[in-house]
Image (tube, rainbow, N blue to C red):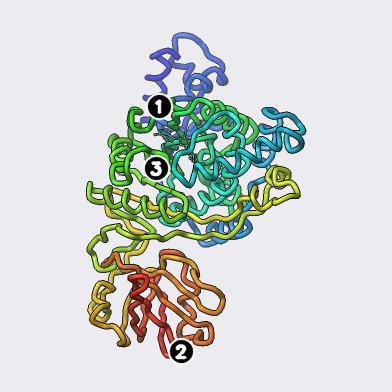
Amino acid sequence: MTPELLSLARYLASSRARFNLSEMNRYLSREYKEKELYESLKPHFFDLDLFCDVHYKCTKLVNTPLPADEQVIRELEEMLKAPHLPPAIENLVGSYIERSCGKNWHTGETARLLRENIVKQKEEYWSGSSKYPKLRVITYLLYHFPVYFCQFQNLLLDLLKGGLLTTKMSIVDAGSGPGTITLSTLDFFNRLLEIYSRNKIDVKINLRIDSIEKVQENIDIYNELTSLYLSQHSHAKAAITVNQPVHAPVEKAEPPLDADLIIFSNVLAEMSAPPAQRAAAVERLASESRNPTVLLVEPADLVNSKALRVTQNALIKNGFTVYSPCTFLWGAVCTGGDCWSFREEGNIRVPEFMRKMSGTEEAYRYLNTDMKFTYVILRRDGAVEHKYRAGGKFARLSHLKKHVKKRINVVVSVMSGNLGDDEDLVFKICDGTTSIPCYAVLHSYHMNENNRALTEAGYGDIVEIFGALIRENREFSSYNLLISRSTIVIPVT
Ligand SMILES: C[S@@+](CC[C@H](N)C(=O)[O-])C[C@H]1O[C@@H](n2cnc3c(N)ncnc32)[C@H](O)[C@@H]1O
C-alpha cells in the first residue's frame, strides 16, 4: 500500500458520496487493477468510512443505528425462540473436533478422556480456577461453547432494540477463548442482513472485530474457526474484518481506540483479582473509547452471579451507567450487595457433537443446554433501556420493614424467572433501593387476570403492583410480597 493510494482514497471518501475504484487510476502515477486497489484498501475501509461492494463501487458509510422495525424484531425473536447452533457453526465446530481428535473421537479412549475432562473442567470452572491445556479447549467447544454462543444472541437483540447496534461498529471480544462471541456476532449480523434483504431494507454494515486472549491454544482455534467462517460466509452488504487476537492478559493489553462494543463473556470469574478490583481491567480496556457499550456476562451460579454485581457497582462508582438489566427506579443507585439475579432463556437444542459426546451412560453429565446467565450492559452517557421512574404513590422496597403485614403499592423490576414451582410462583423483584432480597410470591390458585402480568414480565421488565401483602421472612433475611386475587399487577414497560 503506497501513501499515494491511501491519501487519494481518503480524499475521494471525504469529497464524494460514491465512486468506482477504477476512477482512482485517473489520479495515480501508475495504473492498478480494481481488484488490486480493493485488496490494498480493504484494511482501511473501516477507518475511511467507506463501503466498497464486490463490483468495486464505493459509497460513504453513514454510521446510524441499525433499523429495528417491528417486523425485523419479530423475525429475530422467532429465530431465537428455538435456540440452536446454526448448521454452519455446528459443522465448523464438529469438523474442528474431528480434525483435532480423529473421526472416531466420540468412541474409545479419546471419548473417555474427553468425558473425564468435561467433568474436571466443570469442577474447576465453578471453583473459579479454569485452566486450558490442549484437550480442555476441545471440551470447552463440546460442552460450553453452544450455550454461550446462543445466549449471547439474546443480548445482541437487546442492543439492536435499544439502537446500540450501528452500521459501523468496532467490537472487542475480551477473553475470546475459541471465538464464541465473535462467531455468535458474525452469525447474528449475517442473519440480520438476510432479514433486512427479505424485508427490502437497504442496509450496509462495516464491522471490525478485535479480540484479546491470554492462552495461545485458544488463539489458534479462534483464528482457524473465524477465518473458516468468513471464507464461507461473505455477504454483499457487509464488510467485515476480524483481526488476529492480541495475545495478552486483558489487564495488560493496549486499550483499543474508540471501540463501540466491548464484551467480557465468562472472563471476569477467571481473573485472580477480587470482584471489585476486576472493574479496573474493564475500565482500562474502555479508557480509549468515547462512549462504548460495555457488556459483562457471567454464569448464573451464586458466586459468579453475585460477583458480577460487585464489579458492576465498582464500575458505576467510576462513572459508568447501567443500560440494563437494572433500572434504578427511584434514581439512587443500589450497592450491588447480595444480589443473585440471572436471566433464563430456556434450553438450546443439543448439537450433534454434544449428543455424540454424551454417549448412552449418564449422558446428562455431558449435556449442557440450559441458558442461564448474569449480565450487565454499561454505558457512560446515562442511556437506559427503561426510562420509567417511580413516583410518590408507591412505597420503596427499602421501607418494607414499616409495612410488614400491611397491603401496599410498589413499582419494581422483575429480576428473575419463576424461582418456585408451578404451584407457588416466586419472582425476585427490585427497585434499586435495598440490598435485602425481595420476592413477589403468587400461589397458582390466586392467579387471575388482575395479577397474571407478573408471570408474563420479561427479565428486567417493570411492573406496578397494587395491594401486595408484606411478609418478613426471618429465616432467609428477606421480604415476600404476597400477590392475592385482589392484587393488581400492571406492566409498564
Ligand atoms: C470461560 S472462557 C470464555 C470464552 C468466551 N469469551 C466465551 O464466552 O465462550 C474464558 C476465556 O478468557 C481467557 N482469559 C481468562 N482470563 C484472562 C485474562 N486476564 N486476559 C485475557 N484472557 C483471559 C481464558 O483464557 C479463556 O479463553
Give the distance between the C-alpha atoms of the residues marked 2 and 3, in whole angstroms: 43 Å
Looking at the image, residue 403 lies above or below residue 262: below
Specify the amino acid type for callout 2. Answer: Arg
Q: Which residue is mark 3?
A: 268
Looking at the image, residue 238 lies above or below residue 81: above
Residue nearest the observer in this picture, 192 or 127: 127
Secondary structure beneath dot 1 equals: loop
358 with respect to 119 (left or right): right
**Marking on residue 485:** 2
Specify the amino acid type for callout 3. Answer: Leu
Q: Say which quadrant the N terminus sits in.
A: top left
Q: Earlier in the sequence, mark 3 or mark 1?
A: 1
Looking at the image, residue 7 lies above or below residue 102: above
Residue nearest the observer in this picture, 20 or 196: 196
Mark 1 nearby-residue class (10 Å; few <14, some 14–19, many ≥20): some
Specify the amino acid type for callout 1. Answer: Ala
